[in-house]
């Protein structure tokens, strides 16, 4: 009598994944404790609001880590998708603040419009606005990705093109003062789906929403990285022609990663609006997009948690140093990008591995 048994290879694979899954659960548990228990107790309302802003940037960084760290696509234009999500959310909140049938305050101030533009009207619906914050960036990324990856644009050309699109969006928003707020953007947002954002309790609620979103995004990225798609994405990064020879289309693989990263950036932009109370072209242009990449490089683009921690660290350093050295912060920011690239290519996430290798090498030499 025979019994069905798992194939040896499948047993070995499941055994190999078990420690990684256990370590991930521990990591998510520790992150939840820090974000939901320690931070609200240790930080005041102002600093907790700043942390909510940093966590939004960390959500963008997780997507960049997936596209750049795993897929080899240097996305210097994530500000496009961050801005689309942010403006979609801000448009709904401004309409809600104005009330039914009323124009947002900045439209009345500039006096260029007598009626609400047609493309603003759908954002009065909260369900449409919420869906648009994620689906609109993903749709734009899908269309751009089809044009870019089908033509096999990659490397520096892809990075420059994505950055040019980011600059184009910022210029477009600045030129539409009557409908987008121009240089000022959409400011003075007072409410969030019926909750007063001037109330400290509601602002803490926003923080908890952002923290939960970051953990959810990390969970999605972790699952993708460990899946067959994640392995295929790394294979495309390391040998695109070999993957094509094996019968897979690298364009489709990169397109999926690019679209997912865009959705994460759009979600971050949507949460950034209630957390900060403003969205403007200055927050989605070329410089912010480069700062996203700097945070990922500092944290470690090939890891899961590294991009998020790097983005938080760089954002915190920017706030702390710009308060004391406002004219010299940009030099420190450039240095933060150069040092990891030259001395620690794997970012802070690889620091433990680097120290372990140094220790083992010194032990071998002494013995």
Image: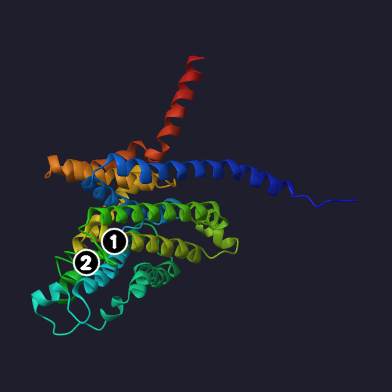
Q: Quadrant of residue 180?
A: bottom left
Q: Position of residue 43 (x, y in %)?
A: 26, 42
Q: Is residue 40 visible?
A: yes
N-term-proximal mark, 1 vs 2: 1
In the figure, 164 relative to 293: above or below?
below
Residue furthest right in the image: 1
Question: How many residues crowd mark 2 within 10 Å: few (<14), some (14–19), many (20+)?
Answer: many
**What's the residue at 65%, 46% (across, down)?**
13
Q: Position of residue 172 (x, y in %)?
A: 21, 72
Quickly name the residue at label 2: 170
In the figure, 161 relative to 59: above or below?
below
Q: From the viewer's perspective, is 2 left or right of 190?
A: right
In the figure, 139 relative to 226: above or below?
below
Q: Nearer the viewer, residue 331 or 279?
A: 279
Tell me the distance, in whole angstroms, between the alpha carbons under discs 1 and 2. Answer: 9 Å
**What's the residue at 32%, 51% (across, down)?**
55
**What's the residue at 35%, 75% (across, down)?**
128
Pointers 1 and 2 in contact (C-beta within 8 Å): yes
Check residue 190 in the rendering and tell me which mark sits there, or answer none. Answer: none
Question: How many residues crowd mark 1 within 10 Å: few (<14), some (14–19), many (20+)?
Answer: many
In the figure, 84 relative to 117: above or below?
above
Q: From the viewer's perspective, is 234 left or right of 171?
A: right
Q: Nearer the viewer, residue 252 or 5?
A: 5
Q: Position of residue 90 (x, y in %)?
A: 25, 68
């Amino acid at each position: 009598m025979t019994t069905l048994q798992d194939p040896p290879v499948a047993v070995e694979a499941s055994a190999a994944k078990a420690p990684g899954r256990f370590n991930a659960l521990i990591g998510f548990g520790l992150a939840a404790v820090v974000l939901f228990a320690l931070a609200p107790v240790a930080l005041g309302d102002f600093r907790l609001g700043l942390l909510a802003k940093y966590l939004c940037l960390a959500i963008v960084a997780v997507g960049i880590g997936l596209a750049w760290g795993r897929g080899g696509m240097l996305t210097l234009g994530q500000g496009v998708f961050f801005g689309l999500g942010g403006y979609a959310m801000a448009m709904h909140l401004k309409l809600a603040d104005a009330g039914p049938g009323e124009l947002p305050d900045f439209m009345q101030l500039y006096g260029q419009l007598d009626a609400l533009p047609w493309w603003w009207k759908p954002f009065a619906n909260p369900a449409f606005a919420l869906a648009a914050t994620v689906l609109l960036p993903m749709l734009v990324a899908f269309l751009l990705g089809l044009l870019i990856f089908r033509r096999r644009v990659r490397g520096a050309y892809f990075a420059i093109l994505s950055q040019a699109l980011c600059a184009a969006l910022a210029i477009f928003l600045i030129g539409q003062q009557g409908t987008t707020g121009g240089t000022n953007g959409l400011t003075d947002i007072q409410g969030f789906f019926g909750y007063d954002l001037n109330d400290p309790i509601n602002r803490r609620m926003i923080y908890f929403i952002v923290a939960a979103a970051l953990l959810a995004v990390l969970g999605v990225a972790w699952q993708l990285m460990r899946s067959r798609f994640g392995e295929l994405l790394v294979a495309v990064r390391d040998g695109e022609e070999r993957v094509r020879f094996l019968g897979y289309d690298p364009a489709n693989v990169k397109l999926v990663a690019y679209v997912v990263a865009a959705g994460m950036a759009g979600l971050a932009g949507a949460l950034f609006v209630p957390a900060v109370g403003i969205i403007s072209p200055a927050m989605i242009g070329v410089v912010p997009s480069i700062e996203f990449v700097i945070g990922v490089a500092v944290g470690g683009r090939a890891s899961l948690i590294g991009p998020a921690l790097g983005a938080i660290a760089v954002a915190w350093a920017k706030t702390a140093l710009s308060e004391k050295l406002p004219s010299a912060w940009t030099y420190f920011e450039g240095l933060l990008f150069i040092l990891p690239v030259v001395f620690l290519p794997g970012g802070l996430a690889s620091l433990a591995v680097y120290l372990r290798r140094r220790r083992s090498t010194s032990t071998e030499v002494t013995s």
